[in-house]
Amino acid sequence: MKTVKPRYGMDEFAQRGQTFYEKMVKPSVTEADRGKFVAIDIETGAYEIDEDDFLATEKLLQHLPDAQIWLCRVGHRAAYKI
């Protein structure tokens, strides 16, 4: 399995991921998507949605192997809770 090295600092990474989510993903999700994981490439804005976090990221990596992935969850402030 190939390891993708981060190309952005943590702040820029988070800002880009959240911006893509708000502008491109959020307007197209429905109530049926609530709770699903969204894997977003912070460079292209390409994304995949799945109920399983691993599957969402794997789907995205299938067509963008070097994706810089921001993971979030529809209808939640964060992907996970502690």
Image (cartoon, helix red, strand yellow):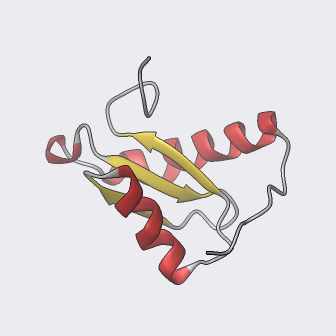
- Quadrant placement of the N terminus: bottom right
Q: Nearer the viewer, residue 62 or 28?
A: 62
The residue that appears at 28% across and 50% down in the rendered structure is 29
Name above or below for residue 71 compared with residue 2. Answer: above
- Residue 70 x/y as whole percent: 58, 49
Q: Nearer the viewer, residue 54 or 42?
A: 54
Q: How many marks?
A: 0
- Residue 10 x/y as whole percent: 79, 37
The residue that appears at 52% across and 82% down in the rendered structure is 63
The part of the image, by quadrant, that contains residue 59 is bottom left
In-image side of 23 versus 74 (left or right) = right
The residue that appears at 59% across and 39% down in the rendered structure is 18
Single out the residue that lies furthest toward the bottom. 63
In-image side of 1 versus 23 (left or right) = right
- Residue 58 x/y as whole percent: 45, 68
- Residue 9 x/y as whole percent: 85, 42
Single out the residue that lies furthest toward the front. 1
Single out the residue that lies furthest toward the left. 32
Name above or below for residue 67 compared with residue 81. Answer: below
The part of the image, by quadrant, that contains residue 65 is bottom right
- Quadrant placement of the C terminus: top left
In-image side of 40 versus 50 (left or right) = right
The residue that appears at 80% across and 55% down in the rendered structure is 6
Q: Nearer the viewer, residue 73 or 54?
A: 54
